[in-house]
Image (cartoon, rainbow, N blue to C red):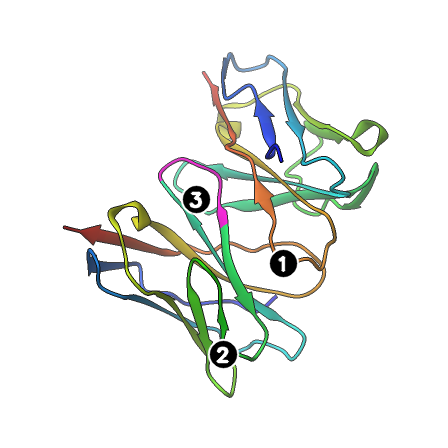
Amino acid sequence: EAGVTQFPSHSVIEKGQTVTLRCDPISGHDNLYWYRRVMGKEIKFLLHFVKESKQDESGMPNNRFLAERTGGTYSTLKVQPAELEDSGVYFCASSPDRDWYGYTFGSGTRLTVV
Amino acid sequence: DAKTTQPPSMDCAEGRAANLPCNHSTISGNEYVYWYRQIHSQGPQYIIHGLKNNETNEMASLIITEDRKSSTLILPHATLRDTAVYYCIVRSSYGKLTFGQGTILTVHP
């Protein structure tokens, strides 16, 4: 089966611009998660979708971040406007059941804001 | 979710067993112990998980102490490709993973 796909793999944008990251989970996985690692810090949870609904968005840093999951399939994470501190690697993960043991992570999108 | 404590780094010779410890003294009864690893800049990779019994799969073994306050991940025959950051995570059934600093495991020839 295809894994979790994220694109772009790299993005370099200027401060103040908008960037949209996309995640395609494994087909049939109802649960989709976004995480990120900013420079020198630990990997941090951002939010959790169950199908198209936001189950937990407690990790979203501020209202410049907007996540959507259209029809419970792929998800997008928009940063508008981007700030320098948003630079880092954004990971997406999916699982078929929130109690299932293994999440599958994508390879991440490396975002650089200059 | 309970916090975990891991050594910042460990070394292991290729072909030998790598034993990575983790302390989770505040773990509660319904929390599982999970291990993930991150190789270079790839996404984290699930390795194994357990509640209170020891577990083994094709990648590793997980030994959990009887009081569940600590655990050890065992890679029975480490290879160079096992060089990675290993994360011990305690998680309830809610779903969110809380990553710490992890242990940087270096496997050398």
At x 57%, y 76%, the residue is B27
Amino acid type of disc 2? Ser
Q: Residue A55 or A92: which is nearer the viewer?
A: A92
The residue shown at (73%, 28%) is A74
Q: Chain of mark 1?
A: A
* Mark 2 element type: loop
Cα–Cα gap, marks 2 and 3: 24 Å
Foreground of the two, B96 or A83: B96
Which secondary structure type mostly characterizes the magenta part of the structure? loop
Quarter containing the C terminus of chain A: top left
Q: Residues within 10 Å of mark 1 (few under 14, many from 20)?
A: some
Give the numbered dot on residue A101. 1
**What chain letter is assigned to the residue under label 3?**
A
The location of residue A6, given as percent across then percent down, is 58, 26
Earlier in the chain: of badge 3 and badge 1, it is: 3
Q: Is residue B107 above or below residue A12?
A: below
Q: Where is residue B83 drawn, in percent x and y?
A: 29, 48
Left or right, B3 with reference to A81: left
Mark 2 vs mark 1: give the one in front: 1
Q: Residue under label 3, please give it.
A: A41
Name the side, left or right, on which B1 lies relative to B34: right
Depth check: A61 or A96 in front?
A96
Type of residue at label 3? Lys
Q: Are marks 2 and 1 in contact (CB under 8 Å)?
A: no
Q: Is residue A114 visible?
A: yes
Q: Is residue A45 highlighted in magenta?
A: no
Q: Which residue is mark 2?
A: B25
Question: Image point 37% across, 65% down: which residue?
Answer: B6
- Indicate whether A79 appears above or below A14: below
- Report the span colored magenta: B40-45
Left or right of A112? Residue B82 is left
